[in-house]
Image (cartoon, rainbow, N blue to C red):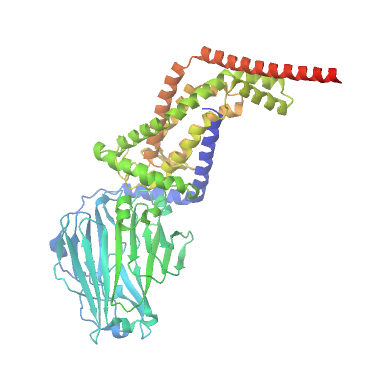
Amino acid sequence: MDRNTVIGFLLIFGLMLAWMYVTMPSEEELERQRQERQARDTIPEQEPEEPRFEEDLAETDPDVEPVETRSLGVFGHETVSDTIDTWIETPKFRARFTNLGGGPASLELKQHKRWDGGPVQLMSDTTRSAYSLEFLSTENYNIETDELLFRPVSTEPVITLDKGETTTVQYELELEDGSRMIYTYTIDADSYQIHLNVGFEGVEHYISGRSFELAWKPAIPPTERDIASEAQYTSAYSYAGGVLEEFQPSDEGYSESIITGDVSWVASKSKFFTQIMKAQENTDGAILSAELAIDPDNGEMIHDYNTAIRTRLSDASSYNYQMFLGPLDYYQLRDFDGTAYDMVDTGFGFMRWFSDPFVKYIILPFFAFVGGFTGNMGVTIILFAILIKIVLYPLTKKSFESMAAMRELQPEMEAIKEKYKDDPQKQQQATMKLFKTAKVNPLGSCLPNLLQIPVLITFWRFFQNAIEVRQERFLWAEDLSAPDILFNLPFTIPLMGDHIAGFVLLMTASMVIQMRVSGQGNTAPNPALKMMQYVLPVMLLFIFNRLSSGLSLYYLVYNALSIVQQLMINKKIDHVKMMESVDKKKAKQLRKEQLLENKKKKKAQAEEKEA
């Protein structure tokens, strides 16, 4: 590991340290999360209950009391007095639709689980519809339709869809004069998308301001063990005018962001899951809001993000919306909207030009194709590390050869340093002259390391957010998107956390071995640089210990391949022959300089004779 490699790792370390400093929760919060997790882990495990449709069919929920609507003017007219549920099950999710608000009140993903094995629920409030139409009535009442009881048009209590099938669920709200508001949901068994058509039959005359908002009301509940880490990735988004805006306040309390003009879509997301609303007609703005508060029951920070998209009334009698409720899967999101995957953090802002196409067109296709054959993401990561090593092999080979040449010049560099120890400028000039004479590029080993920096940073961010590796097992690692915890510590170490991860230890050992194999640690002229080559693996141990085990596995394999490659190249390099080649280059350069000097002398003598 030469000086350029050390500089490269220092740059990576600086970037990681800055990000960790900005986003790392406080020591008090880490301690609270650790105690809370230990308390949860001591609760005896219970077998998950099987779905019992018989008990759910068309029952009135005794815990749900419809909001009194008599004070809402014409919208206080009730044609239904009970809450009625409709269950819809597809290969991808199990949803409960309710007539309280006329929409989905619960949606559990069937192909994903919480960290504790429970179902992933995308709605924190399961008593009423997650979607609500909101507007000011002409009678000056604030209307929120999730407080109103609709009449379900469909009477089927359970609808089960097989692959390739679709169904519709319809609700209507009838006013006293016969005006109606109709919600029609279309569900596709093969998709996480839900289509909503909002129809007005006279109701538009009771909407003041000629606009209304479709709002998403509940928060997306946490799904990961490390709640503090998950909160760092929880936020709301809007996409308007080709620009993606993130809304993520850090202070407790209520805050909001108002977007004006035509908005393509709005969304709220957690670390791995999202809900998105997209209007198919032109919009008139959007509102993103957040409520951050401490839960008094368990001390956890509640991150409640709401989104609303505003639509201006037109001559049309109906308005169409496309919803997405599911994982942050690239191919699923691409089918919904080509820009939706931009919510996933693939790298720092200044790196997105590289990380976005690298993830979308190289990493994800490779993982999808190869993962289909291997059936294991750990094996797929290993194969990808091998692929990257093969692609970079020509450059790496030149890098190692350049490092070998630099080692051969080390004695002469030391002699120059000793000779001009009191004159740094002459020392530098003599050193550069030596490089020029020997035709050795001191930066020849830098390029492969520079190429690895954006790849490493992309993987660092990708594995933290990739649903593709979430809860994927490999060896002892239970989740390649989280640390592979070997054992927990009774205390918290800054940056490192309160645990020890397995692949990180192996990765650190591989870095030390690679440094020993390269031999640079023994020949480094600067003692501080020599010490840094040993300290760097320890610093990365502290940082990588809290990151994805998939990242540590990738870097471990890459280091192991680098060790093998370097041993093979070192074995093939004839150091005596190389030194002879260096000496020949130096002799040839000296002869050129001597000839040039002789020409100058002859020219000077000729000029003297003429004078």
Q: Residue furthest bottom?
A: 177
Q: Residue at x 72, y 22 (%)?
A: 420
The quadrant of the image that shows the C terminus is: top right
Where is residue 585? Give x, y as percent. 59, 17
Going by the image, does 140 lie left or right of 26? Answer: left
User: Would residue 600 be seen by someone viewing this image from the given angle?
Assistant: yes
Q: Residue at x 21, y 81 (%)?
A: 79
All told, the count of numbered labels is 0
Q: Is residue 225 above or below residue 379?
A: below
In which quadrant of the rendered view does residue 527 lie?
top right
Q: Is residue 208 above or below residue 3?
A: below
User: Would residue 501 be seen by someone viewing this image from the given angle?
Assistant: no
Where is residue 91? Give x, y as percent. 19, 54
Going by the image, does 184 lie left or right of 73? Answer: left
Where is residue 326? Give x, y as percent. 29, 56
Going by the image, does 98 lie left or right of 363? Answer: left
Q: Residue at x 22, y 54 (%)?
A: 92
Q: Residue at x 48, y 38 (%)?
A: 453
Q: Is residue 516 above or below residue 373?
A: above
Q: Nearer the viewer, residue 328 or 35?
A: 328
Q: Residue furthest front?
A: 610
Q: Residue furthest right?
A: 611
Q: Is residue 444 above or below residue 460?
A: above
Going by the image, does 361 lie left or right of 51? Answer: right
Where is residue 114? Give x, y as percent. 29, 51
In which quadrant of the rendered view does residue 382 lie?
top left
